[in-house]
Amino acid sequence: MELTLSNRDFCIYLLTQFPFAVDEEKEMMLSDYIMEHPGMPSEDWIEELSGKTGKDGQETEPWNGYTYVHQINPQVTFYAEFHPYNTVYFFNDIYLGNTGGHFHLSLLSWQEFKQIVAKDKYERSPLFLLLLPLTIGRNRETSEIEHAILEELRNTSLAFTEEQLQEVVKFICRHVVFKEEEKNILTHREGIGLVTNRNHSERNHQHTDEELVSINEIIRLATGKN
């Protein structure tokens, strides 16, 4: 299976991995919008990507879904495991988060995200859309984020109309930038690194110092900071 932006079904699937992407006025989530525009991939395709489920709807063992592998730099490799109803993310063997029922996503600042994807030299790479669900943006960064998402969507194999593109951009931006600005702030803790008060994050300020140092160190390596 080709896991690039040339694969229309894969692009559609990636857009369903933003659980905070909600239009409150329309009372609609991005995943619901995608079911209408342009429509979901077939169940057979999704099963091939994420693995089979049993009669109870649970993942069968052994898991037989796909893993996307992308070398960020010589020190860090990114992995995205596609499971039924859940994508799980890693830098090397360090867990970053997941999109499943007990999702953990809010992790990277927009600046860290940009530093990582800027080094992406692979043609038709999905890295931008794979890491974006893990990203936190500030309100003052909204225009820049919307523009970057729009340009990335135009680089996919999805035939959105201009109106649909703008709608999808707004959905995704709502996932990245919360209305409550205090939820968008990553603060520096001495000897630890960045922490957030978003509960669904491996950088949550209530995690142990050891856990926070570990996640901050792997993110530092991924961004290429000394």
Image (cartoon, rainbow, N blue to C red):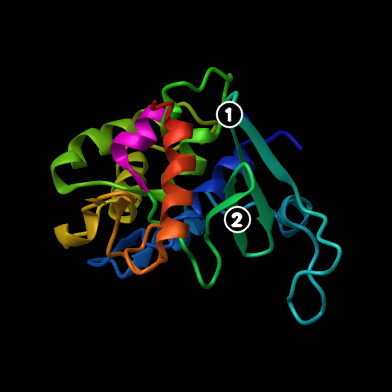
Report if the CB atoms under discs 1 and 2 are less than 8 Å apart: no
Residue 118 in sight here: yes
Figure check: 166 above or below 102: above
Q: Is residue 133 visible?
A: no
Q: Position of residue 173 (x, y in %)?
A: 29, 48
Mark 1 = which residue? 75
Residue drawn 78% across the image and 58% down it? 51
- Is tag 1's residue or tag 2's residue first in the polypeptide sequence? 1
**Left or right: 206 in relation to 159:** left
Specify the segment rendered in magenta.
108-115
Classed neighbour count for the residue bearing mark 1: other residues with Cα under 10 Å, few (<14), some (14–19), many (≥20): few
Q: Is residue 29 magenta?
A: no
**Image height of 221 relative to 27, above or below:** above
The dominant secondary structure in magenta is helix
Residue 132 falls in image quadrant: top left
Quadrant that contains the C terminus: top left
- Callout 1, which amino acid? Gln
Pick out the residue farthest to the front: 191
